[in-house]
Image (cartoon, helix red, strand yellow):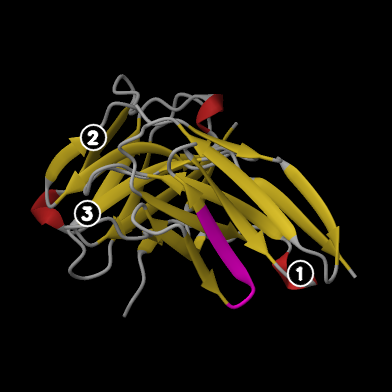
Amino acid sequence: EAGVAQSPRYKIIEKRQSVAFWCNPISGHATLYWYQQILGQGPKLLIQFQNNGVVDDSQLPKDRFSAERLKGVDSTLKIQPAKLEDSAVYLCASSRTGINYGYTFGSGTRLTVV
Amino acid sequence: GENVEQHPSTLSVQEGDSAVIKCTYSDSASNYFPWYKQELGKRPQLIIDIRSNVGEKKDQRIAVTLNKTAKHFSLHITETQPEDSAVYFCAASGQAGTALIFGKGTTLSVSS
């Protein structure tokens, strides 16, 4: 099966600019997650979708981050305006729904804010 | 919410030795515990997982043990090889549908 697709792979922006990341999950995976991984740390959940509904966005800094999953398939994560501390790898993952399964992660987008 | 602690943060072993990484979790309702391996610049890859109705699971050189009473689980790698060098993350999640919460990772270095 095809994996989780993410783009772009790398992005460099100046602080206060905006940026968007895209994710296409594995076909048939109803649940989609966005994680932030700062260098040297474990992935931190930003938002979880099931189909096109939000399940958990308690860790999403809503003053600057937004995410959507229109039509319950692909998803976009946006940061506006970016801060230096947003420099991280943004990982998208998907899983089947029903019982807990291990996720399949995408390759991630490495964001550098200068 | 769930909190996962992972130790040690770094681990260096000689090729052929065993390596053990330990994690504790806080939410007694957690019932799924996967382990991921992440090589430099790559995505995390699931290497083994265990559910709360099982105490131990093995897959060739890797095994995971779970102690629900103590709320801790461990990854055991035997006969380590240089290609085992990577960052390993433990994670936990509760009832079906809740997101994984990850530990901070263990950097394993296997020297030949």
Q: Which residue is mark 3?
A: A31
Tag 2: residue type? Asp
Q: Which residues are magenta?
A: B60-65
Mark number, residue A56: 2
Figure label count: 3
Residue B41 covered by magenta stretch: no
Mark 3 lies on a secondary structure that is strand
Residue B61 covered by magenta stretch: yes
Q: Where in the figure is residue A109, as x and y percent of width and height?
A: 47, 51
Residue visible at 29% across and 38% down in the picture: A47
- Left or right position of B104 against A76: right
Mark number, residue B80: 1
Tag 1: residue type? Thr
Question: Tag 2, which chain?
Answer: A
**10 Å neighbourhood of mark 3: few (<14), some, or many (≥20)?**
many
Residue visible at 76% across and 63% down in the picture: B18
Mark 2 lies on a secondary structure that is strand
